[in-house]
Image: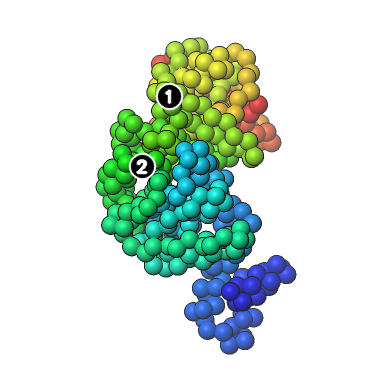
Amino acid sequence: MALLARISEHRESGRTADEVARRLRGEGLDPALLAAALTQTELRAGAVAKFGELAGELLFTRAALEQATRERVAALHAGRFRSAGCRAVADLGCGLGAESLALLTAGIAPLPVELDPLTAAFARHNLAVLAGRLGVDAPRVRVGDAERLGPGGADGAFLDPARRTAGHSDTRRIASPDGYSPSLSFAFGLAERLPTGVKLGPGLDRALIPGTAEAQWVSVDGQLVETGLWFGSTARPGVRRAALVLRGSDAHELTAPADAEDAPERRLGAYLYEPDGAVIRARLIGALAARIDAGMAGAGIAYLTGDRLVETPFASAFRVLEELPARERDLRRALASRDIGALEIKKRGVDADPAALRRRLRLSGERSATLFLTRAAGRHVALLAERC
């Protein structure tokens, strides 16, 4: 820890990582130890976005940090267990302890379990840091297979199944849910006995969602980060689909008892709306359309259109300037004649590579705009727009 503190001091004084490494190597420090400490310093800096100011005292592995829950989202998870009256929650597959940290902060006793010994040791350290701040005993981290060890004496359970191959860096994503650890069958079986939450990737195959679960998709500052499945008293009565949109310090949510039917297709209006990813994945586009008096820009296309601007946290709004020719050669001439140089390209329902198209367009103007390539009224369209 002293070495980490020294590296941080050097970095805060303005020295680059290479300068710090050369300086400390010159003092005869073990190269392997120094490399590990420099990596840890780098990970701590990157972890601030997820763990806040506490990150500077915690320990991380690259792979576990990538899967760790953001502090604010973990606090919302813990709030569900608190509302359910849970006093002790098993954190099965605890990783670096993000969920257990949130439970501890909420006054709930976490019972963490982690399969990987190094990650478990880091979780133990991380929980001890927070416990020291709170003046409570640090939870014991059990090391082993969560399916074998089980929830112990907990009255609730949270599972964040490993969705990457084993290791601490250069891991790859596991494609099939059958390879998750703990397995989905174990998680869903546990949910039949205890109030349970299961954190999964935002692209989860919806066919895998049990009918008894509340499924909530969460986006943070425009990035879709997770699918949360909630069971028993952690699920809200009458809610089976939810889209939670967190932007800055604000939180907004759409909920429904089931998937919403898409709104009817309508002619293109003066405004185009791009729903947040959480709304799209929750299949609540129709519910959003009803809120903002809009219709589908094209059948099965996740763009909405309307004649008046309605502010909403659930979608980005664009003013449609004009329709341009869809053929690439004509499109290039049209954009050049309008002095467009910086072009944001969005597409749905058409086969196009925005990055490759942008290169081929060879734009050099002074103005910026957004181009939508999509289908409307059964045909391909190119819509020039500006953000509202």
Q: Which amino acid type corresponds to the residue marked 1 in the rendered image? A: Gly
Residue 74 visible (yes or no)? yes
On screen, residue 51 versus residue 124, left or right, reads: right
Name the residue located 57 percent from the left edge and 60 percent from the top edge. Answer: 136
Closer to the camera in the image, 223 or 186: 186
What SS does tag 1 mark?
A: loop
Residue assigned mark 1? 238
Q: Quick one: label 2, few (<14), some, or many (20+) residues within 10 Å? A: many
On screen, residue 50 versus residue 185, left or right, reads: right
On screen, residue 106 versus residue 90, left or right, reads: right
Name the residue located 28 percent from the left edge and 42 percent from the top edge. Answer: 189
Q: CA distance from mark 2 to mark 1?
A: 19 Å
Residue assigned mark 2? 194
Residue 378: assigned label: none
Figure coloring:
rainbow
Q: Where is residue 16? Give x, y as percent.
A: 65, 69
Q: Determine whether 348 is above or below 218 in the image.
A: above
